[in-house]
Amino acid sequence: MDLHILDHRLRVTSISKNGLVNFTHPLIKLIFLRNRTRCKFFSLTETPENYTVVLDEEGFKELRPSEHLQVESSIWLPLNVVSNGNASSSSQAVGVTKIAKSVIAPLAQQHVSVFMLSTYQTDFILVKEKDLSVVVSTLEEEFNIYKEEGGESVPVHCQDVSNGLHKNGREGTVHPVLIPKNQFCVMSLDPDTLPSIATTLIDVLFYSSSPKEDPQSSPSQECVKFFSFSLIDGYISLVMDTEAQRQFPADLLFTSSSGELWRMVRIGGQPLGFDECGIVAQISQPLADSDISAYYISTFSFDHALSQSDMSWVMQMNHTDHI
Amino acid sequence: MDLHILDHRLRVTSISKNGLVNFTHPLIKLIFLRNRTRCKFFSLTETPENYTVVLDEEGFKELRPSEHLQVESSIWLPLNVVSNGNASSSSQAVGVTKIAKSVIAPLAQQHVSVFMLSTYQTDFILVKEKDLSVVVSTLEEEFNIYKEEGGESVPVHCQDVSNGLHKNGREGTVHPVLIPKNQFCVMSLDPDTLPSIATTLIDVLFYSSSPKEDPQSSPSQECVKFFSFSLIDGYISLVMDTEAQRQFPADLLFTSSSGELWRMVRIGGQPLGFDECGIVAQISQPLADSDISAYYISTFSFDHALSQSDMSWVMQMNHTDHI
């Protein structure tokens, strides 16, 4: 298998709920006006706490400093696992499950913190730029590693970082999990049809807190607001719950042929931060053990795993205070 | 003929060019998300100086106070002339010409300041609420006057204001005019198809100062940026130059059958303010004398008349230093 270090230098930021109005202008530009920006990696995820925005340096230039904007200090690089045509040996599971044993667990053992961003098309594993040499030395046994530079893929080998390697990771903190009642779908959209859903998407992303003239049934307390939009290298991915989905025209958004709905597990009773390692590993391990496909989306405060199975795999996580 | 005092209490505001980013959020709501607002009268006009926003009190609530927002202190009421089915006696001319002698000139003589807002559908004459009794006493000889109140039209008569009437208006200041090179079209749009042009409209209104990846030919120095969008009682009107028009799909915006282009006259070398009277009268008089149809759009700083004729009528304005 190949591992590609993509040619994006990313920032992970958070916009406060009541500060979003100050960022409507740059965010709409980044989402809808591709010919006015050089940004190639953009992701916006709404959770009850805030909006997580992950974007490359070109996109980051659009965000003005503000009391409402928190910026994680590191530069993050996205990694992408590419199967080189060989049929998967045993498992058909995809998402974070596919890379649980080959990427997530080894990085956790080396105390490398990761930020996961699953999309409809693929899974990005974001690592801090300063951890790159440890990442390469950790994963080069399992993968052919390439660094994308100006459209070319250049092989990368570990130089002289083995001195920094840890052999045994310590056990991570066990975080409580929450399983909300609402169900989610993971969808995509032809970028050329993005204008067709612009007003609906703008409404959902930027005005959901504003009252409507004809209010619809409000979601139950046990539902969690979660909406994710990404436009990465020209590919669009959307994750939304069934209530949001009803607002979009059914014929424009497409999903996998099974069309099944996904349940979510939110990880972290307190904001997780960006330094702790092993959070994704802790979740992906029981998923991999049970061969369950899962999307995984990290945000500024909490992590989110989406699976189609019943939630029995959650019980396999040790000492879990699930709510 | 009937004159209707419409059931809107309007504010006239200006947003500075570099302050627009702070108002993208409320303006997009007012333009595109009709079910999230009770605003029924909204007009946004871009000129080189600023953005003029005219909107009712429900809409005005959406605009947060800011150093970038100027608010004219008066409440303005829109008047609308309604022909009651009688064929026009002599003239087919429309717009400000139609009301030049019956509304504009008499109000100027009574020192009533007006703010004109022509749209594709009709012409609104805005007057200050405090001038209303003078307006009624001035125009009730010529018109049956009705006040719209909660959907009903109630006849209005002058009570006791004749003491305030002036018999002779003094000559107004003569303002220089500018005739830009670009040509304009006046168009409309089915409100249900507004989402189809949302990204283009957003691009033109909010991002025209932002560089494009594939820059188009920049307009000549002698062209003047002017773009007006209004959504009033469910009717949409757009005024734009041919360069902006090319960015919209030709099949969605519709215009009058002649489809002719309009030339503009800008009035005012210095900002006109809101207290001087007779500016519209001074322009509409030569238009009426020559029976020339014209749209007229006041903005926060300058006034704008649009006509399809050659510009010889401008020469009939006394002492005009036209550029």
Image (tube, coloured by chain):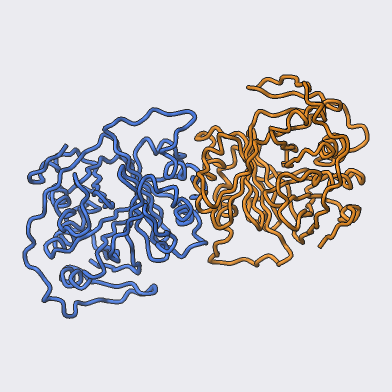
Chain colours: A blue, B orange
- Please state the horizontal and vertical placement of residue A154, each as a whole percent of the image: 30, 76
Q: Nearer the viewer, residue A223 or B175?
A: B175
Position of residue B127 relative to residue A34, above or below, is above
What residue is drawn where x is 37% and y is 30%? A218
* Residue at the far bottom in the pictured view: A160
Position of residue B89 relative to residue A111, above or below, is above
Judge whether residue A5 can be spotted in this image: yes
Picture quarter containing residue B246?
Answer: bottom right
- Please state the horizontal and vertical placement of residue B247, each as a whole percent of the image: 63, 55
What residue is drawn where x is 55% and y is 41%? B32
Q: Nearer the viewer, residue B36 or B155?
A: B155
Picture quarter containing residue A134?
Answer: bottom left
- Please state the horizontal and vertical placement of residue B104, each as a whole percent of the image: 82, 38
Position of residue A160 in the picture relative to residue B258 (left or right):
left
Picture quarter containing residue B221?
Answer: bottom right
- Please state the horizontal and vertical placement of residue B143, each as a whole percent of the image: 83, 26
Judge whether residue A85 can be spotted in this image: no
Q: Quadrant of the N terminus of chain A?
A: bottom left
What residue is drawn where x is 84% and y is 34%? B166
Q: Nearer the viewer, residue A276 or B17?
A: B17
Total number of numbered labels?
0
Position of residue B217 in the picture relative to residue B312 (left or right):
left
Position of residue A249 relative to residue B135, above or below, is below
Position of residue B185 in the picture relative to residue B310 (left or right):
left
Q: Nearer the viewer, residue A309 or B129?
A: B129
Q: Quadrant of the C terminus of chain A?
A: top left
